Image (tube, grey):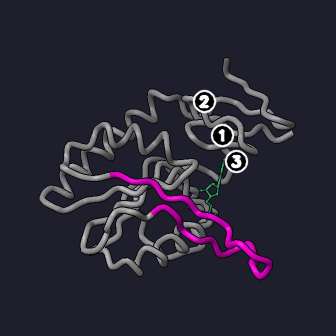
Amino acid sequence: MTRKKVHDKEFEIYIPNAEIQRVISEMAKKLNEDLANKDVIFLGILNGAFMFASDLFREITLDSQISFLKLASYAGTSSTGTVKRLIGINEDIFNKTVVILEDIVDTGVTLDNIIKQLKGYEPAEILVATMLFKPDAYTKDLVLDYVGLEIPNDFVLGYGLDYEGYGRNLADLYRVIES
Ligand code: 5GP
């Protein structure tokens, strides 16, 4: 099945899972080489990065940790809805090499927010590994250390990414068909 309908939108297959796995293997190989002998903790950003984090971490041979974080809106009426609080940091990341695992970097606003908050915990360094990157939408100067695939500015679905909560379970990556 190369087409999927989720709510009101129609999607077509874009990047098959086999290609995603090939890209992840390459990224894992680089991480295993680059981060040898470092005290590494991978931090997957929920919800979208759960599938990428799982597939990537399976191929990591470093003695390392993994944990998952989530951005939550501040409670209360003064929330602007734009600044989100990072929740779920239980492991001590002080002095460690942190590798943020993101499903997709679009404008970079989310990543910028995450990095700012993580810096407060004083890790040794913060690296970024993202499965997908939309360079045309990017508005930040932050270096993306590991990028799986650069994609155009289309809305994508599957491989952990949702449309209004659905479609995360699709193994392949789909893109919206503009009607
Ligand atoms: P940014 O803050 O970089 O603009 O956006 C990051 C977040 O926007 C991602 O974590 C993801 O939740 C969402 N996002 C951006 N582009 C897409 C897309 O093409 N498909 C889906 N499903 N989510 C996206």
Range of residues picked out in magenta: 66-88
Q: CA distance from mark 2 to mark 1?
A: 8 Å
In the rendered structure, which amino acid carries the disc numbered 3? Answer: Phe
Q: Quadrant of the N terminus?
A: top right
Residue topped by disc 1: 157
In the rendered structure, which amino acid carries the disc numbered 1? Answer: Leu
Q: Earlier in the sequence, mark 2 or mark 3?
A: 3
Q: Is mark 1 within 8 Å of ligand 1?
A: yes
Left or right: residue 43 compared with residue 176? left
Q: Is mark 3 within 8 Å of ligand 1?
A: yes
Element on which disc 2 rests: loop
Q: If the picture is divided into quarters, which one holds ligand 1?
A: bottom right
Element on which disc 1 rests: strand
Residue topped by disc 2: 170
Name the residue rendered at 80%, 78% in the picture: 77
Q: Earlier in the sequence, mark 2 or mark 1?
A: 1
Q: Is mark 2 within 8 Å of ligand 1?
A: no
**x, y percentage for residue 29?**
25, 44
Within 10 Å of the Cα at label 3, are there few (<14), some (14-19), or many (20+) other Cα atoms?
some
Q: CA distance from mark 1 to mark 3?
A: 7 Å
**x, y percentage for residue 97?**
27, 66
Q: CA distance from mark 2 to mark 3?
A: 15 Å
Name the residue rendered at 57%, 40% in the picture: 160
Left or right: residue 71 compared with residue 131? right
Q: Tell me the tag on residue 155.
A: 3
